[in-house]
Structures are given as structure tokens and as C-alpha cells.
Image (cartoon, rainbow, N blue to C red):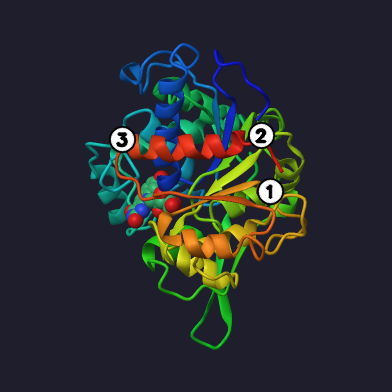
Amino acid sequence: MSAAPRSAAPRVTVLAGGVGGSRFVRGLLHQLRTEWPAAAGGPEESMPGSGTAASVTVIANTGDDLWLAGLRVCPDLDSIMYALGGANDEERGWGRRGESERVSAELTAYGVGWPWFTLGDLDLGTHIARSSWLREGLPLSEATARLCARWNPGVALLPATDDEAETLVTVADEAGGTRQLHFEEWWVRHRAALPALAFTQHNVERARPAPGVLEAIAEADVVLFAPSNPVVSVGTILGIPGIADAVRQTAAPVVGISPIIGGAVVRGMADACLSAIGVETSAVAVGAHYGARGLPGAGLPGAGLLDGWLVDSADAAVAASAATGPLAGIRTLARPLWFHTVEETAAIAADALALAARPRP
Ligand code: FO1
């Protein structure tokens, strides 16, 4: 990390999915405000929603996005915006607190939308506002900025791209062939129970990083991969042409936090995604999949991306033994990665920042 003077909080850019990503970023903000209260806009008590942007930029996955009932729905952007703006439904991890579903029932009565994908009444306000701005010709990044002007998430929230590059899941069909589903149908309707044969990002070759994304990576003091799904969240962000190379080329150290603990996913169904791309569900395998920066990447095409990799204490021994093998070139740190409270998450973020600050060998 370039020697950010003690008075200034480091500029941190996080690649994140929705639910796990927003919980991690909340801890990161807590940590930055604790270490740099002046620079980060005062104590957390005034957050969330005080509008004091810390030095954090979140690049959010947009592969889950879809048109539904004529509206553009952006699950990961909204999960992060609501969670950091203090409006999310903590139990579900998505959607709005205190939600109702009167309009959704009407849509179902008309056979509009997906009956198994609930668009809450308050949430619909977000989708209607975003869709109206998109119809005026505004890019998703501008619509997101306008939504955030109300919620004040305390970060710069950027979609990975303004273009539509939706994640499609290839599954076997009944006739011995294959068919493609939108990620949300596979994830919500089928709970990822249909074996995924492949994940593709529709039209991704035409997608470009949204304004500010490449700069946020190039100008960061630290780049972090949140403990989000390495295939359909961090992976789909990296799949937008130009973003992975920006990570490879940034002067900032790049540190990831494993979403896998002791061979089990922390949340969601990352294992169902990892098996589809032939990656074992382990902290070592995911770290090796991202690869060591400057060395030939194991999983992603091209050189690796990571300088550092946080694994849970349960994976300390296996990570240490992998230091000369699959994790060669990546500095690993083993520490508890289960997090339930903001303080626990802040401690993880602190260790990630400390690992980033260690001089490179
Ligand atoms: N997840 C569900 O399990 N069931 C739902 O009905 C559902 C609706 C929904 C509506 C808007 C939105 O932004 C997210 C929604 N989600 C729902 C969550 C969504 O599947 C996840 O947030 C991500 O796409 C997966 O990380």
C-alpha cells in the first residue's frame, strides 16, 4: 500500500457480490472509521446514511441483474445499497426491511413476472425509479448514483458495467440436451439444485467497465476481493473485459478473503458454482483459482490476481503446506473468518489491510 499518511484513510476498492459482500463492506467501513475517524467522516454512530463517504469504492456484480415485469432489477447493487444505507432486511439478506408484497400479489394474479421471485412494494420503488432513469437514457451507473443519493451507503457504489451481461446457467434438459437459465431462476426457483454445467455472461464481450471502475482499481491503495462467490460474483466482475487486467496492473496490493471455510461455503451455494468450473470447494483451491499476481494463473485465463489471501484458522495447515504449491507467490494469513457481528467483520478487514500493507517480498 502506498504510504497513505496516518491522517488519511486508505483508498480501498472492493470487488463484491450482494449479501456476503455487503456484510464484509460494513465491517470494512467500521474498521476504517475506527482507525481514521477524522478522514472517514466521524464515528460509526452517524452511519449508515449520514452521507459521509469513506474512502471505499465498491465494484458490484451486475450478472444477477434482469428485466422483470418491465423493470430492471439489480440484486447485488441493491443488497449493498440497502445494507449500507440501513434499510435492508437483515434476516433475508436482501430486499427492504418492513416490506410488504401487495403489488407482487397483483403481478402474480396477472401472470406477470416470476411468482417465485418476490418484488416487494418498497423494493419496487427502487426498480421503478431505476427503470425510469434508464428509459430516459441514463446509464446504470448514473441511476445507481441517484439511488445512493437517497440511501447514503457511505461508499462509492459502482456497477461493474453499465452494459447488460447477465449470468446464464447451462443445465441439462429433459431431452438429453442442455438449456440455459437466468442465474436468478437457477438460484431462487431451483435453489441451485440443478447441476450447473457452465456459467456464461451473456454478451460479455461487448461489455465495458462502468465509468470509474478502472480508475478505482488503478488508484486504490488496496484492492480487496470480498468473501463473495468466486464464480458468479467476483468471477463475473472479473469477467468484464478490462477489469482483470486492471487488477493485475494496479500498484495497489490485492488481497482476497476466502468465501470457503474448512471445505464448506460460508453462505449461499458457492460449492454448486465451483464444481461447475472444476474448482474444489476449498480455500486453497479458490486462492489458486484467482492465482498469484505475476505468475501464470491457475484458473482464470492469464496471470494471477492476488498478492494476499486470508483463510480461516481451520485451513491454516493446508494453506501453509500449499505455500510452495498451489498458493505459491500468494502471502496467506490464517485467522477466524466466520463473522456475525460488525466488530468481527471489522477485525477481518483490519487483518486484510495489514496483510496488504506488508512489504511485498
Ligand atoms: N432471493 C430469494 O431467495 N427469493 C426471492 O424471491 C428473491 C427476490 C429478490 C428480489 C429482488 C432482489 O434484488 C433480490 C431478490 N432475491 C431473492 C435475492 C437474490 O437472489 C440474491 O440477492 C442474489 O441475486 C444472489 O446473491
- 2 and 1 marks in contact (CB < 8 Å): yes
Of badges 1 and 3, the one in the foreground is 1
Q: Say if disc 2 is inside 8 Å of ligand 1.
A: no
Amino acid tagged 1: Ile
**Corner quadrant of residue 112:** bottom left
Of labels 2 and 1, earlier in sequence is 2
Q: Is residue 120 left or right of residue 1?
A: left
- Where disc 2 sits, the SS reads helix
Amino acid tagged 3: Leu
Q: Find disc 3 in the rendering and name its residue.
A: 122
Which residue sits at x=59%, y=43%?
Answer: 255
Of badges 3 and 2, the one in the foreground is 2
Give neighbour class at mark 3: few <14, some 14-19, many 20+ (Cα, 10 Å).
Answer: some
Q: How many marks?
A: 3
Q: Position of residue 227 (x, y in %)?
A: 48, 49
Of labels 1 and 3, earlier in sequence is 3
Give neighbour class at mark 2: few <14, some 14-19, many 20+ (Cα, 10 Å).
Answer: many
Of labels 3 and 2, earlier in sequence is 3
- Where disc 1 sits, the SS reads loop
Q: Find disc 1 in the rendering and name its residue.
A: 240
Position of residue 96 relative to residue 64, above or below, is above
Distance from disc 2 to disc 1, alpha carbons, whole Å, reads 11 Å
Q: Find disc 2 in the rendering and name its residue.
A: 213
> In the depicted view, which residue is nearer to us: 203 or 209?
209
